[in-house]
Image (cartoon, rainbow, N blue to C red):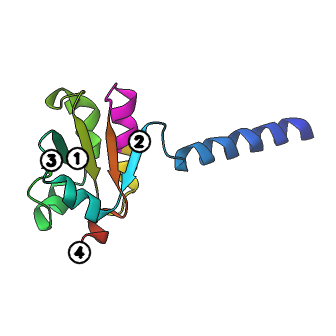
Amino acid sequence: MEILQWIIVIIAAGFVIKLFLPAKGISNITTKEAKDKFKEKDVQFIDVRTPGEYKANHQKKFKNIPLSNLASRTSELDKNTEVVVICQSGMRSAKAAKILKNQGFEKVTNVKGGMSAWV
């Protein structure tokens, strides 16, 4: 029985670690680097916060697609064009970036610190 408990603990630890590791092929940038990307033409900017959060404070370049709706709304985005994702702190946008990557988006970038880090 003791071996089974250790196996369960190891599997659970592996799952938790995987949640916090960045997905392969996802870049992380600062808010300053995100601002610099505003000058680029072929970039899609997505804010995955709730509509209320978005309405209270957002950057005009970012389109609001809440995380809960993202998987069903990826057809609104071009898989071959870079997608820059932001949320309030960087946690939801990291999840969103993984969703996009898993759905075949080529270049996905997460804004570290999210809107909380925006100066």
Q: Quadrant of residue 26?
A: top left
Mark 4 and mark 2 residues within 8 Å of each other at the beta carbon: no
Residue at 26% x, 47% y: name it: 84
Residue 28 versus residue 72 in the image, above or below:
below
Mark 1 vs mark 2: give the one in front: 2
Identity of the residue furthest to the right in this view: 2
Looking at the rendered structure, the kind of residue marked 1 is: Pro
Q: Assign a secondary structure to mark 2.
A: strand
Q: Residues within 10 Å of mark 3 (few under 14, many from 20)?
A: few
The residue carrying mark 2 is 26
Mark 3 vs mark 1: give the one in front: 3
Q: Which mark is residue 40?
A: 3
Mark 4 and mark 2: span between their CA atoms? 23 Å
Residue 84 versus residue 103 in the image, above or below:
below
Instruction: Looking at the image, tell me whether mark 1 or mark 2 is earlier in sequence order.
Output: 2
Q: Residues within 10 Å of mark 1 (few under 14, many from 20)?
A: many
Residue at 14% x, 31% y: name it: 76
Q: Which residues are magenta?
A: 96-106
Mark 3 and mark 1: span between their CA atoms? 24 Å
Mark 4 and mark 1: span between their CA atoms? 22 Å
Where residue 108 sits in the image (x, y, percent)?
33, 40
The residue carrying mark 4 is 119
Q: Which mark is residue 66?
A: 1
Looking at the rendered structure, the kind of residue marked 2 is: Ile
